[in-house]
Image (cartoon, rainbow, N blue to C red):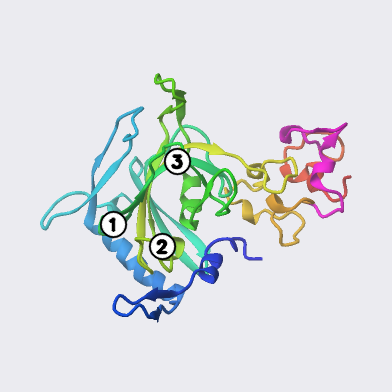
Amino acid sequence: MNKFKYYFILIITCLSLFSCSKDDNSIEEVPLRDFGEQFAKDNDSIEKYLKTHYIEEIVNAPGEIRDQDVKLTKIPEGGTQVSILSLLNSSTFPKLLMKNVELHDITYKLYYLVLREGTGVKPTNVDGVYAAYKGALLDQTVFDQSTNPQGLYNLDGQTQSPGIPVIRGWAEVFPELRTGKYVESDKNDGTLVYTDFGAGVMFLPSGLGYYVGSGAIPAYTPILFNIKLYEVRRYDHDGDGIPSYLEDINGDGDVYNDDTDGDGIPDFRDIDDDGDGFTTRSEITINGVLTPFESIPDCSGNIPTDLKKKKHLDKNCH
């Protein structure tokens, strides 16, 4: 099973690949491009952008909505500003990092700039995140931005309440940041004041964004997002009593590649993780009470140091 079947396949399958002619309202077909060929073009555009732009300003305003806003500016001819690309793998922040993403039978290079890592917890790629964002084309045209810093977005790409599904690029970059701290504001209106949160900029090839376009974003267009991670919401996708982030057994932040029984269904969506015929929920329920994850024993009743030996992951233990 494609571990990220929920991303882009539905977009490509369900969206019409046609646009209306401005001249006669006839239907003009927009051909679907090869993912590999398009990525090569997008990557050239992104790397050119990184070579020719620099960080002009990072707003340091703790407790304000504009905290960690960033201004990226083109280096003028003859300018000596430090390019964003020169910050690749820097030992200090801000730093540019790159990760490989396997999708569409190709390997995407995904660049992201970490302005501040944050001090709290990291989300996994199936959590919800309370975040703020500003999205723009590489020519700096802003196509969207958040108006509510407490907006909730689902990194699993699924529509569920609460939370808005997001694109694959977000699911790759947000887990590289950490949350910060927050307190209730003195306005007594329920709003929160956030500090020390993770913030950065992601530079997305169209295959990790809106491949065939969306709204003000043209088809086959690389984009960037300035993002801020305020808090994480954990989900239990399969209702087995174990929050999905705790089903990241190998601890790599990718919950899709943990499949204990090898049945093609990742543990976070599998009601019987070890394939022994007994549901996970029943195996960790004692006298009608769910056992907290950290207290789930192995077959002998001991708390294992190896998570794979917990009783619900051992098909020889009922």
Q: Is residue 89 something one can see in this rendering?
A: no
Asked whether, in this view, residue 222 is left or right of residue 17, the answer is left
Q: Residues within 10 Å of mark 2 (few under 14, many from 20)?
A: few
Q: How far separated are the C-alphas under marks 2 and 3?
A: 21 Å
Q: How far separated are the C-alphas under marks 1 and 3?
A: 24 Å
- Which callout, 2 or 1, points at the residue further toward the start of the chain? 1
Q: In the displayed structure, would residue 136 be above or below residue 59? A: below
The quadrant of the picture occupied by the C terminus is top right
- Which callout, 2 or 3, points at the residue further toward the start of the chain? 3
Asked whether, in this view, residue 116 is left or right of residue 251, the answer is left
- Which callout, 1 or 3, points at the residue further toward the start of the chain? 1
**Residue at the spot of label 1:** 50
Do the residues bearing badges 1 and 3 touch, measured as CB atoms within 8 Å?
A: no
Q: How far separated are the C-alphas under marks 2 and 1?
A: 24 Å
Q: Position of residue 184 (x, y in %)?
A: 45, 23
Where residue 214 is drawn, which disc sits there? 2
- Along the line of sight, the residue nearer the viewer: 161 or 297: 161
**Residue at the spot of label 3:** 131
Query: Is-magenta flag for residue 308?
Result: no
Where residue 279 is drawn, which disc sits there? none
Amino acid at circle 1: Leu
**In the rendered structure, which segment of residues is drawn in magenta?**
274-297
Rendered residue at 56%/66% (across/down): 10
Secondary structure under badge 2? loop
- Along the line of sight, the residue nearer the viewer: 219 or 244: 219
Q: In the displayed structure, would residue 301 be above or below residue 143? A: above
Query: Is-magenta flag for residue 293?
Result: yes
- Furthest-left residue in this view: 78
- Along the line of sight, the residue nearer the viewer: 24 or 65: 24
Q: Residues within 10 Å of mark 1 (few under 14, many from 20)?
A: many
